[in-house]
Amino acid sequence: MITQVTEASAADRAGLVQGDVIIEAGGQPATNAEVARDALEAAQENDRPLLLRIFRNGNFMFVAVNLTEN
C-alpha cells in the first residue's frame, strides 16, 4: 500500500495517491515491497516507465510511472 506520495514526484505526476494498493509492478505480482523495488530498479536501468497495476476505491487500474522528468 502506498503510504505517502511526495508532491511533484514521479508517483504524483502519474496520479498515484496515498492508499493505492500496488497489485503488480513491472508485470510481477507485488507480494512484498522488495518486488516493487526490484521492478523500479529494472525500469530505471532500462530507461522505461514503471508499469503498476493498482487497486483504488474498489477498482483495478494500470498506471505507467515515467521515471524521467519532463
Image (cartoon, grey):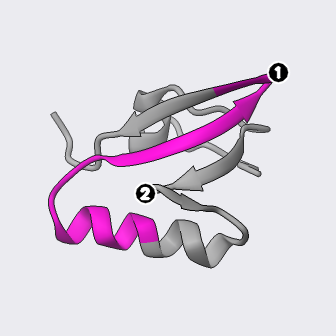
What amino acid type is highlighted by mark number 1?
Asn
Label 2: state its secondary structure: loop
Q: Give the residue at the far right of this rendering.
A: 58
Viewer can see residue 8: no
Q: Position of residue 26 (x, y in %)?
A: 43, 57
Q: Position of residue 10 (x, y in %)?
A: 39, 42
Read off the residue under disc 1. 57
Checking the image for residue 26, the label placed there is 2
Q: Position of residue 70 (x, y in %)?
A: 15, 33
Label 1: state its secondary structure: loop
Magenta residue span? 39-60
Question: Does residue 29 appear left or right of residue 43 in this picture?
Answer: right
Category of crowding for the residue at label 2, using alpha-carbon neighbours closer than 10 angstroms: few (below 14), some (14–19), many (at least 20): many
Q: What residue lies at 46% left-to-right and 55% top-to-bottom?
A: 27
Q: What residue lies at 66% left-to-right and 71% top-to-bottom?
A: 33
Magenta includes 23? no
What amino acid type is highlighted by mark number 2?
Gly
Question: Does residue 24 appear left or right of residue 10 in this picture?
Answer: right
Magenta includes 48? yes
